């Protein structure tokens, strides 16, 4: 099967800066693909390479089997939802949504109909006569989505689409986007720095750092089996265990990650590994408590459910976890 | 302490303000008044009588029409050149980053900061060195130097507010460069261009110094008026023309002022 988007050894350099450095990736058709990383990690440049706003310095890009290098944005069957939405302030909402059809020469009646349908799809029916300035952030986000989708793109690119929304709205939009993607069957490529968003929405995640993909896999893979220290750190907050510490636990001399929620407090079960330490601090997070424990000089964070008892600061505790939860990583950073 | 809007200013301040305004506008009123005087050789006050005959006299003077027509042509062509060059330059400076950008920005603005007499002498010597005969085109070139600045300044301010992602969004939605210019860039900068163009037209229309150096034998309207002041007869004709000039330059500037103000509101509401 042809990949929706294919990167072969793609680099984009800005002077001496390697924004994207020898990236290989293949986005499958109909997939919800997330590119996750901190700012400056190259994820947005990758998206702009797909959209055609940037051209690769080296390497080869294909979109549905067609070579994309040198093809300008307006000849690609790909549409973008911009981070700042980039709605045209001088046009009504309906004309904004119909813009893509207008420049393609679709007749007025037809494109108005299509634009109204698209607005209904994003739950903004009847908003066509308003101006972008009269809408809230969440509504503008929906208009931007409708404006892109009305062109029936083969790939929809989303650049931090939920970044400017407040938490409640963001969670709601996450679900809506996911539902929309499933019902339309369009390939979504989605850039975010929010690991929670990537984990909850994507079919697969590419974790970026320094212009390179650190790991590419399903959310579960990336979360439970981080390949590198960076991934373990960036995706959820993991305990990074130094090779010396890992050796003491009876595993090989390697870096390892241990998720805070995989550790039990004073609840050792059969077959689990155990270490003891002293409670340094604890904080209440609502659904859980975060307890920091000093184990022979190594600080470990433990996430324990709010329902279970929390040990006092300074008390001795036993930490236990299944050997399978101790995930060994490449020692290089 | 908060000053109340209804609180009246002290009388001294009121008088000073009225005096300031009179100082600014009374001379213009006098120009208007003398357009109607019956005395044609000197400006005596009060005018011995009022008449409308100078309007008819002015209407029938071919030299007025020639000068007016030359001024309108020069201002129109200079404004047209300025609109194209000023917009292109503003687009380049505000939308891209390149080596020497700040320098270019400064060099473009410089002609309006230079005294007109410097521009005039520089152009005149350049024209004679290149053996270019003086004509309407040399005047147009002279005027274009400062008209470009006015358009550039207006356009560059507007371009800065038009987010770069609008252009990308347009291209992303399938519009090529020309369509993007027509449907996205132009509607967003049009009021700025209109304002800049009107200001450029008004500046060109009453320009004297640069025109003196680049005009050769021809007279634009302001030059014609200067020459006319020396002549002893039919003086009120100058006043009639002056009235026309005031109206022709004042109306566009007023319109430009309101248009840019509205433009700010439109651009602001889009954010």
Image (cartoon, helix red, strand yellow):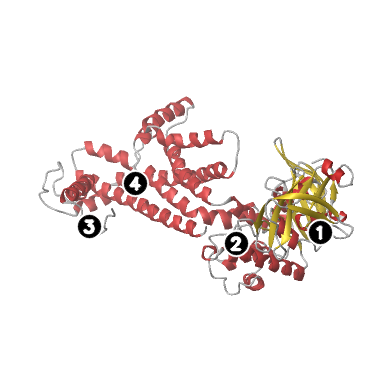
- A102 displayed left or right of B127: right
| Cβ atoms at labels 2 and 1 below 8 Å apart | no
Among numbered discs 2 and 1, the one appearing first in the sequence: 2
Distance from Cα at disc 1 to Cα at disc 3: 71 Å
Distance from Cα at disc 2 to Cα at disc 1: 26 Å
- A317 displayed left or right of A251: left
Disc 4 marks which residue?
A: B68
Residue at 43% x, 51% y is B195
Distance from Cα at disc 2 to Cα at disc 3: 45 Å
- B136 displayed left or right of A304: left
- Residue B253, given in percent of the width and then of the height, sits at 36, 50
- Residue B107, given in percent of the width and then of the height, sits at 49, 34
Q: Determine which of the numbered discs, if any, sits on residue A166 in the image.
A: 2
Mark 3 vs mark 4: in front: 3
Q: Is residue B72 above or below residue A195?
A: above
Among numbered discs 3 and 4, the one appearing first in the sequence: 3
Tell me if mark 2 has few (under 14), some (14-19) or many (20+) residues whose alpha carbon lies within 10 angstroms of its own: few
Tell me if mark 3 has few (under 14), some (14-19) or many (20+) residues whose alpha carbon lies within 10 angstroms of its own: few
Q: Determine which of the numbered discs, if any, sits on residue A125 in the image.
A: none
Disc 1 marks which residue?
A: A220
Tell me if mark 4 has few (under 14), some (14-19) or many (20+) residues whose alpha carbon lies within 10 angstroms of its own: many
Which of A149 and B150 lies nearest the eye of the viewer? A149
Mark 2 vs mark 4: in front: 2
Task: Write down the chain letter for disc 3.
Answer: B
Q: Label 3: state its secondary structure.
A: loop
Q: Label 2: state its secondary structure.
A: loop
Residue at 66% x, 68% y is A172
| Cβ atoms at labels 2 and 3 below 8 Å apart | no
């Amino acid at each position: 099967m042809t990949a929706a988007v294919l990167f072969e050894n793609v680099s984009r350099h800005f002077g001496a800066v390697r924004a994207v450095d020898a990236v290989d990736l293949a986005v499958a058709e109909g997939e919800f693909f997330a590119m996750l990383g901190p700012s400056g990690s190259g994820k947005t440049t990758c998206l702009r390479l797909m959209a055609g706003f940037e051209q690769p310095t080296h390497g080869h890009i294909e979109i549905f089997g067609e070579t994309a290098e040198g093809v300008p944005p307006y000849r690609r069957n790909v549409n973008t939802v911009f981070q700042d939405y980039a709605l045209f302030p001088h046009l009504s909402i309906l004309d904004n949504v119909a813009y893509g059809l207008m420049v393609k020469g679709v007749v007025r009646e037809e494109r108005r109909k299509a634009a109204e349908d698209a607005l209904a799809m994003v739950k903004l029916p009847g908003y066509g006569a308003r101006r972008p300035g009269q809408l809230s952030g969440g509504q503008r986000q929906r208009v931007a989505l409708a404006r892109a989708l009305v062109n029936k793109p083969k790939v929809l690119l989303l650049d931090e689409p939920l970044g400017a929304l407040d938490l409640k709205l963001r969670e709601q939009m996450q679900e809506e986007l996911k539902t929309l993607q499933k019902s339309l069957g369009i390939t979504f490529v989605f850039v975010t720095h929010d690991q929670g968003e990537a984990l909850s929405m994507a079919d697969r995640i590419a974790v970026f750092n320094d212009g390179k993909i650190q790991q590419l896999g399903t959310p579960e893979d990336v979360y439970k089996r981080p390949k590198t220290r960076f991934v373990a750190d960036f995706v959820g907050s993991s305990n990074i265990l130094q090779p010396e510490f890992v050796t003491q636990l009876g595993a090989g001399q390697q870096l390892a990650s241990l998720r805070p929620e995989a550790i039990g407090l004073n609840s050792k079960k059969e077959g689990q590994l155990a270490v003891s330490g002293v409670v340094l601090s604890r904080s209440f997070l609502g659904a859980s408590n975060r307890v920091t424990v000093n184990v022979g000089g190594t600080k470990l964070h433990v996430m324990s459910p709010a329902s279970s008892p929390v040990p006092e600061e300074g008390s001795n505790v036993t930490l236990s976890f299944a050997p399978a939860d101790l995930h060994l990583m490449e020692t290089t950073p | 302490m908060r000053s109340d809007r209804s609180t009246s200013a002290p009388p001294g301040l009121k008088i000073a303000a009225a005096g300031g305004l009179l100082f600014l506008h009374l001379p213009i009123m006098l120009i208007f008044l003398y357009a109607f005087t019956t005395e044609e050789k000197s400006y005596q006050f009060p005018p011995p009588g009022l008449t409308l005959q100078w309007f008819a006299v002015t209407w029938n003077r071919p030299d007025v029409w020639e000068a007016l027509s030359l001024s309108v042509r020069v201002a129109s062509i200079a404004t047209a050149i300025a609109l194209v060059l000023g917009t292109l330059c503003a687009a380049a400076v505000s939308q891209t980053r390149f080596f020497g950008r700040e320098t270019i920005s400064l060099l473009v603005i410089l002609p309006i900061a230079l005294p007109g007499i410097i521009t005039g002498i520089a152009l005149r010597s350049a024209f004679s060195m290149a053996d270019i005969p003086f004509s309407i085109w040399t005047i147009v070139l002279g005027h274009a130097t400062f008209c470009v600045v006015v358009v550039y300044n207006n356009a560059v301010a507007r371009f800065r507010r038009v987010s770069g992602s609008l252009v990308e969004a347009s291209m992303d939605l399938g519009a090529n460069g020309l369509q993007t210019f027509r449907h996205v860039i132009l509607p967003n900068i049009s009021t700025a261009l209109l304002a800049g163009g009107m200001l450029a037209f008004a500046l060109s229309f009453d320009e004297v110094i640069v025109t003196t150096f680049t005009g050769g034998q021809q007279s634009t309207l302001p030059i014609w008026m200067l020459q006319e002041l020396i002549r002893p007869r039919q003086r009120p004709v100058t006043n009639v023309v002056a009235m026309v000039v005031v109206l022709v330059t004042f109306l566009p500037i007023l319109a430009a002022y309101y248009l840019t103000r509205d433009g700010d509101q439109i651009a602001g509401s889009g954010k």
